[in-house]
Every structure is written in C-alpha cells, then in structure tokens.
C-alpha cells in the first residue's frame, strides 16, 4: 500500500476526474433526486446496493455503540439504532466504509452543540476568519451555569472588525455564521498554505468527541479535525489527505443537508459517487486511505426536519437560540477527523 511520504500534497488529480467533478457540480437537483441510471450510491438504500457488501467489522463495532452514544445524550434513552448500525464497504474501493445513519438526530444535535458552542469558541482553534478579523472570543457572554460560550449567543447585528480595514469590511455575526465562516481546525492546527501540521505537540483534541469517534472507529486515535461548513453552491475540490505522518484511517461525519461525495482510487481508474446524508459516517482506510475525493454538490432543503432548527433544537435550546431558528435548513456540516502521527 502507498505510504503517506510517497505522495505529494500539491499533486493534481487525473484529468478525467476533474471532468467528473464538473459534471456532478453542474448536475440538476432533479436529476440527482431521480437517479434514474442508479449511478449514485444512495446511503439510504445502501443495504440493497450490489456495489457494496456488509463490512466484516460491523458486529464488533455494534458492541461499542452504547459506549459511543451514552455520553452524548442528556438522559438514559439510547437511540433505536444504537446497536443496529450497519457498516458497508465498496467492492471496487476496498477500505472505503460507509455507516449510514450511524448518528441519530439527537446525537447529531449534541455533537453540534459541543463543536460550535464550545470548541469553535476556543481561540486556540483557528478558523478561516481569524487571520483577518478580531473574533470576539473573550467578550462572548456567559449565560446560566454550564452554558458554554458561543458565537450563536451574540446578537446577529454585532459586527466583527477587520484587522486591516483597507482590505476587508466589517462583518455581522449573521454574515459570519450564514456564509463567511467556512472551516475550523480542532486539535493539531493544519497549515493550509504549506499543507502541513506543526512540528510541535498539537493542542489537545476534545476528549469526549475523541472517545466517541474511537468507540465507533477504534482504528483511529483522533488528533486533529477540520470542521467544514457548506451551503448549497459550495464545493470541495478533488484532493487527497496526505499530510499526516501515519497511515491511520480518516473518519468523516456529516450533519445537515445531503451532499454528493466523489471518490476514486489513486490512478482514478475506479470511482464512485455517493449521496451522503445527515448522520452518515465514512471511513477511508487501507487502499482507500489516500483516495481522491471531493464534494461537488450540496443539496438544498434536505436537512432532516427536526435538525433544521438547530441551534434552537432541541426544545431546551429554543429560548437561548431563538434568533437562529432554521439556521441548519440549508447547511451541511462535516467533521473530518484524522490521526496526525503514531504515538511514541
């Protein structure tokens, strides 16, 4: 199997994959929903798709599900699928595992709470705006006891001031959270320009989220993550994740709107287009660890009904975040988790 040091993070994808990316980026929503030629693998119908087979690890993973979900729930009720989640592997892309609906809506809501109200409010976690704007981490209001700091707690009309007013205009909190905030890094802070991680010891990865990930996917020790925010019309270009110093798998968790996930082997001779839905997880391991992948399309108005009102969902959050009701209706949130290096 190819090792991470053998691959160039700046390499360009094969030309025919770029053609495929453009095709799906410009595909009509009607054609995608119809899927008349069945070219798209739909995670909702994955159990009956002959292009996949049940992963041999499903039984082992199911035994860990209670331990994974329990810390994320506010009560003792586990989701119905806590021990029924299935994992499927693509025949033509060995090591690419899909776990449809592995996160119930309540679990997704709690994960979103932790990511946005706690981790994204940590000034040590960089985002795409921090080089250019004074993000008001320290002035965020503290509500009732145990209420975390959150950008969603600030009035929507509050402005973020640019560090250089000549280059950038002020942004309101509403503009930031509706469109301008595109990514946040957790744990090891990735350098997007040089495509590398810092040599020094990384920031601690959020412990409860790391435990959750490891209970579902014990192959990985979460050390770094990129939280991506998409709106319909946004894309993620073809790339390979090759900056890590070890060959441990990648884990991707999706919440909110559906998206098309284009993935191909190293030379692009085999590919798949997968419709990823809210609550799905993808594991890229083995021969698929360094697969080319992209998100050419985010599908509007496909967020699960209950989750659309997050952060004003569940009911206990309605009073605090009423001004943001419906925020997730046309958002896709993706948490991409990786292990940077092997512990010595």
Image (cartoon, rainbow, N blue to C red):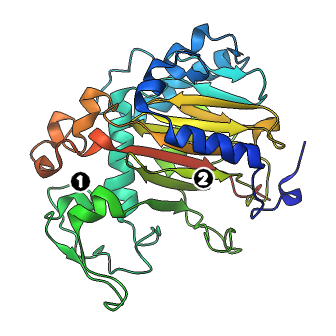
Left or right: 136 in relation to 189: left
- Residue 278 in sight from this viewpoint: no
Q: Nearer the viewer, residue 173 or 40?
A: 40
- Quadrant of the rendered image containing residue 174: bottom left
Expressed as whole percent of the image width and height from the top left, the position of residue 6 reads 89, 57
Using a 10 Å C-alpha cutoff, classify the residue at mark 2 as few (fewer than 14 neighbours), some (14 to 19) or many (20 or more): some
Q: Give the residue at mark 2.
A: 237
Expressed as whole percent of the image width and height from the top left, the position of residue 231 reads 37, 48
Q: Give the residue at mark 1.
A: 146
Position of the C terminus, as image quadrant, is: bottom right
Q: Nearer the viewer, residue 213 or 294?
A: 294
Q: Nearer the viewer, residue 275 or 242?
A: 275
In the picture as drawn, the residue positioned furthest to the top comes out as: 48
Using a 10 Å C-alpha cutoff, classify the residue at mark 1 as few (fewer than 14 neighbours), some (14 to 19) or many (20 or more): few
Res. 292 mark: none
The mark closer to the camera, 1 or 2, is: 2
Residue at image x 32%, y 47%?
113
Work out whether mark 1 precedes mark 2 in sequence or the reverse, and give the earlier one.
Answer: 1
Residue at image x 38%, y 20%?
79
Left or right: 252 in relation to 304: right
Position of the N terminus, as image quadrant, is: top right
Q: Is residue 62 above or below residue 126?
A: above
Expressed as whole percent of the image width and height from the top left, the position of residue 258 reads 43, 33
Left or right: 169 in relation to 46: left
């Amino acid at each position: 199997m190819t090792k991470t040091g053998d691959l160039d993070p700046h390499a360009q994808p094969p030309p025919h994959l770029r053609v495929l990316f453009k095709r799906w980026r410009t595909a009509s929503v009607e054609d995608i929903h119809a899927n008349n030629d069945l070219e798209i693998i739909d995670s909702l119908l994955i159990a009956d798709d002959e292009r996949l087979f049940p992963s041999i690890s499903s039984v082992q993973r199911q035994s860990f599900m209670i331990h994974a979900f329990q810390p994320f729930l506010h009560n003792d009720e586990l989701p119905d699928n806590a021990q029924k989640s299935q994992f499927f592997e693509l025949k033509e892309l060995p090591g690419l595992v899909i776990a449809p609906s592995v996160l119930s809506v309540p679990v997704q809501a709690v994960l979103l709470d932790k990511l946005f109200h706690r981790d994204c409010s940590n000034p040590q976690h960089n985002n795409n705006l921090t080089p250019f704007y004074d993000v008001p981490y320290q002035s965020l209001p503290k509500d009732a006891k145990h209420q975390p700091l959150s950008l969603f707690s600030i009035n929507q009309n509050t402005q973020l001031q640019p560090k250089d007013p000549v280059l950038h205009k002020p942004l309101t909190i509403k503009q930031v959270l509706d469109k301008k905030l595109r990514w946040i890094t957790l744990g090891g802070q990735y350098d997007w320009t040089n495509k590398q991680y810092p040599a020094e010891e990384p920031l601690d990865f959020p412990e409860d989220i790391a435990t959750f990930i490891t209970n579902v996917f014990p192959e990985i020790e979460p050390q770094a993550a990129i939280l991506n925010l998409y709106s319909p019309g946004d894309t993620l270009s073809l790339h390979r994740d090759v900056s890590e110093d070890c060959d441990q798998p990648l884990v991707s968790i999706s919440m909110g709107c559906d998206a098309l996930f284009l993935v191909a082997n190293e030379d692009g001779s085999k590919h798949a287009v997968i419709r990823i839905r809210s609550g799905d997880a993808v594991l890229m391991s083995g021969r698929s660890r360094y697969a080319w992948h992209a998100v050419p399309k985010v599908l509007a108005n496909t967020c699960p009904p209950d989750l659309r009102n997050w952060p004003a969902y569940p009911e206990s959050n309605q009073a605090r975040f009423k001004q943001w009701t419906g925020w997730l209706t046309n958002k896709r949130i993706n948490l991409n988790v990786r292990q940077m290096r092997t512990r010595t």
